[in-house]
Image (tube, grey):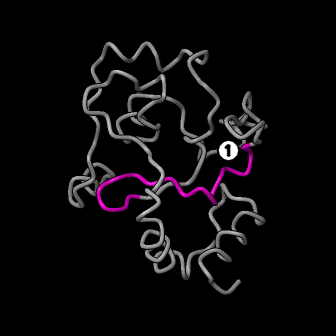
Amino acid sequence: MSVNFLADYFGIRKNKIPHEFDSRFDDESLCRKCGRCCYGSIHYRGRLMIIRELPCRYLAPMDEHSSLCAIYDHRQEHALWCQKVSRESVSNGLFPKDCPYVRGIKGYHGKIYPAPEEAERFYGWLKKIFSDQPRPEYLSEFHWAAFREKLQLKS
């Protein structure tokens, strides 16, 4: 069963990407280094929600608005989970709506943070989802432990 089938089955929206945007995907100068594409996310109520507590183990915060990949030049060899900017990753909504790579794509839906008023419900739902899950490879042990603590799950 393909990922697209599951997305359609569960009502997960795929973005339609006009071909004129393809040339952007190789232009690394467009990246603002916000790091939002480097956080774990999950589909929740029809949207791809960023989980702030689940950054990639190689994401190195520079200040409150920017982050850098500590292994950027070698990420495809060492971080097999890392997604390049591509037609597929954009179609899957892995970038926030204000990302320069996707700006102007009509109807684009990308990663978002949960709204403050839904955070409690979202984290309650995450508690059920992650209650018996092993640590994903992309996470450091520190961030996994902190996430489980936030969800009030036993280590």
- Residue drawn where x is 62% and y is 74% of the image: 134
* Crowdedness near tag 1: few (<14), some (14–19) or many (≥20) residues, C-alpha within 10 Å: some
Q: Measured from the top left, where is residue 153 in percent x and y? A: 62, 83
Pick out the residue farthest to the bottom: 154
The C terminus appears in which quarter of the rendering?
A: bottom right
The one nearer the camera, 128 or 82, is 128
Q: Measured from the top left, where is residue 19 in percent x and y? A: 30, 17
Residue type, mark 1 in image? Ala
- Residue drawn where x is 76% and y is 37% of the image: 63
Q: Disc 1 on helix, strand or loop?
A: loop
Q: Main secondary structure of the magenta part?
A: strand
Q: Is residue 113 magenta?
A: no
Q: Is residue 104 above or below residue 138?
A: above
Q: Is residue 106 above or below residue 75?
A: above
- Residue drawn where x is 27% and y is 20% of the image: 18
Q: Is residue 20 above or below residue 48?
A: above
- Compared across the picture, whether 16 is left or right of 65 comes to left
Q: Measured from the top left, where is residue 130 in percent x and y? A: 53, 75
Q: Which residue is mark 1?
A: 79
* Magenta extent: 43-59
